[in-house]
Image (tube, helix red, strand yellow):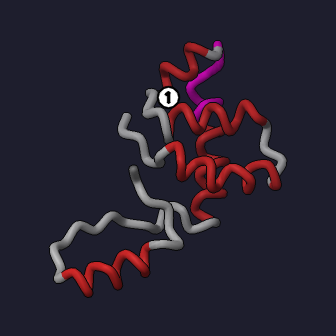
Amino acid sequence: MQPMYTAEDWKKIAPVFASRRLAISTVEIAKAILVDGQRPQDVANARSMSKQTVHAAVKRVRAILDEQGATELVPVLVWLPADLAQQVMDMAKPYPQPK
């Protein structure tokens, strides 16, 4: 599975998970799938739980990510003159960036 978030993005949003009192295991399951790119079935097997339980954990975390606007971002790659490129980079500063 293709990771949806970088480890750095995840660290930035992690305090929100704690404030929502999500179980650590719920966050770890979601991280394994959304950041580490593991398959839900593999996570379920490794934790001796059902695939449905894994999906439910990811669903709870994704709801929080959606609420925080973390899934509304889209990557953009364009060529611009240096002055315009700097303006775009300045506009992007508040948002998580891939490494």
Magenta span has 52? yes
Judge left or right: residue 56 versus residue 3.
right
Between 60 and 87, which is closer to the camera in this rendering?
Answer: 87
Judge left or right: residue 39 versus residue 14.
left
Residue 21 x, y percent position in the rendering: 84, 47
Picture quadrant where residue 97 is located: bottom left
The residue lying at 43 percent from left, 80 percent from top is 91
Residue 24 x, y percent position in the rendering: 76, 34
Identify the magenta region: 48-55
Magenta span has 21? no
Judge left or right: residue 25 versus residue 83.
right
Between 38 and 44, which is closer to the camera in this rendering?
Answer: 38
Residue 2 x, y percent position in the rendering: 36, 39
Judge left or right: residue 76 versus residue 89.
left
Image vertical order of residue 40 relative to residue 71, above or below: above
Q: Quadrant of the N terminus?
A: top left
- Judged from the image, the secondary structure of the residue bearing numbered disc 1 is helix
Residue 81 x, y percent position in the rendering: 17, 83
The residue lying at 65 percent from left, 30 percent from top is 53
The residue lying at 73 percent from left, 50 percent from top is 17
Name the chief secondary structure element in magenta. Answer: helix
Amino acid carrying label 1: it is Pro
Crowding around mark 1 (Cα neighbors within 10 Å: few <14, some 14 to 19, many 20+) is many
Instruction: Determine the residue located farthest toward the front in the rendered image.
Output: 82
Residue on which disc 1 sits? 40
